[in-house]
Amino acid sequence: MTGYSYLYEGAGYSLDEKYGGFLGYRVPTGQIGTSLRPDTAAQIVEATNILNQGFKQVEVGAINTDIFDQIPKQHFKEIGNLMKITGAKASVHAPIQDIEPSGIIEGRYSELNREIVERKLKDVIDKAHDINPKESMPVTIHSANMAGTEFVPGNVEEGEERFKERQIVAINQETGEVRNIFKEEERYMPQYVGSEEFEKQGEKPLIFSPRERLETANDSQWISRINELGMIKKSTDELLANVLPSITNISTLQREGQKMKLNPDIKNQAKKADIFLQNAATSFTSMFDEAYKYSDDETRKELKEIAKKYTNEIGDFNARMLSNGYAEIKNTPHGRKIEVKEDKEAVYIAENLAMKKNLFDEIIVKLGKISSSPQVLKPVEEFAIDKSAETFANVALHAYNKYGDNAPIVSIENLYTGMAYSKPEEFKKLIEKSRETFVKKAIEEGMGSDKAKQISKQLIGVTWDVGHLNMLRKQGFTEEDLVKATKLIAKDVKHVHITDNFGYGDSHLAPGMGNVPIKKHLEQLEKAGVLGNVKMINEIAGFVNQFKSSPFPYILEAFGSPIYGAGAPYWNQGVMRMGNYFSGYGTMLPEQHFSTYGAGFSGMPTELGGQIPGKSSRFSGTPNA
């Protein structure tokens, strides 16, 4: 039998608590906030507009320091007064485009750049405190403003890390330049193609990971440095082969007491050889400095032995020359100096050249056999973490020293894939390193260890942006990976940015308009005990720019906020009581009527109850007599 349900499915029950676009996690209206337009210095105007829409939290900020510096200092206090009058709360977002906490700007590291950024952030902290001097407020700072390692999902069952490196951005620690990008590479190596393994693997190429290619680059760079030293030594050897036998013959005669002098031509050749050896010494010193700075502990032990050999050989030679009477120490205006006796000049030169020749032969061999090459090229995150941590720690310490318990919070924001620290574990390391650096500096200033640790956790935390996190989807990561990341970071969260997208771009849609698992993220934050204590700022500029309307009704619907103080009914129910269409209602009112008579009854003719005298008949259209 046919029933009406085959023709009409029926309508949803609008009083159902899950009706409408409800995400499944209720947030009170008072906890819902949004960011102000970052492209204008008129933040006080923007704040007024946002508060008029009904938001109870606002985030003041600017896209760059030029705009942020155009906000008059009086406006920050006035925004604070506006918050008091309306019962709203404010937070601050530091400038984005020209703030890189590590000091790596335009592809090059500079300590001066880092110090400038640190001063800019201290200024942001001071202005944030002007908004609310009586409470701590989060000041969001991006963790980085530079490209970093890219990751793809790894096969854990096959022994790979879940976050598998796909591309590494490396910095040359010696020059500070960020120009090296290492990607996965397939290669046919002769020793591999000629092996049985090549046949077993179906003649597939060897795959070199970005990390392996980085290590190869460091090896190649170190070998190149050794070859440079070897070329200098080779030129010296060729020169010595012609001149050393003659000098040795004369030195033998001088040892026997004969007063023999070096031929001027031979003497000049000997000086030239010594200059080559000095160049070798300069090259070795530079190599050693670089190697010792960028090597692991095991390699440093080997380098220490090489350094001892070098120092002892030269020291022993000078001592031997002095004790045998071939040279003496003279005081000069520039200090004490070894001066060779004229009648023993050939002896000194012959032994000096022979000693240095043999010494550098041995050093070159030992440098080529050290355990690992110096890691001059390093992933940019591993280099920058110490620099960024110092910046964040110094800014937090400035805040505490100046404002005490009411100091603004340094809240570090996670970024999307392709940027530095996009891997959750690396981002967490940055937070921990920043706190460790704060503790160390605070103790140096006289603060107790326990108190320093407590303050570090209080003043350095996380702004968790679920939209940025969601962009890991385009690399192939799953919803489960995203929720695990929130669980990892949850206890460090001081502030939350809510925004929606589809995982491919930072779309800044209102919640519920993309595929960000907002409910699951909020549940993890609730389990960690931080959700009720943090501000939730909806970053929805993308929606506003495209659709020119307030996102507030959609946010209330998504979070199912109570219409009244607490309990039902909820906004997700109320918003759907009448047709709710994104395309609008169409032409539902006659445009011509309003253009003729206005919007009220008073504009109608007197015969229809209005106040305007009629000018024509209602029937024929001719004027009234």
Image (cartoon, rainbow, N blue to C red):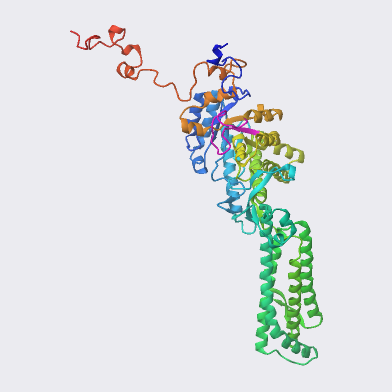
Q: Quadrant of the N terminus?
A: top right
Q: Residue at x 58, y 37 (%)?
A: 503
Quarter holding the C terminus?
top left
Q: Report the residue at 72% width, 84% height from top.
A: 244
Q: Position of residue 555 (x, y in %)?
A: 55, 25
Residue 89's quadrant in the figure? Answer: top right
Magenta stretch bounds: 494-517
Q: Is residue 341 above or below residue 569?
A: below
Tell which residue pokes out farthest to the front in this image.
Answer: 1
Horizontal side, residue 431 vs residue 12: left or right: right
Q: Is-magenta flag for residue 456?
A: no
Q: Is residue 100 left or right of residue 443?
A: left
Tell me if residue 439 comes above or below residue 532 in the rendering. below
Q: Position of residue 339 (x, y in %)?
A: 72, 80
Q: Nearer the viewer, residue 500 or 75?
A: 500
What secondary structure predominates along the stretch shown in magenta? loop
- Would residue 420 be seen by someone viewing this image from the given angle? yes
Q: Is residue 329 left or right of residue 513?
A: right
Closest to the observer, 172 or 138? 172
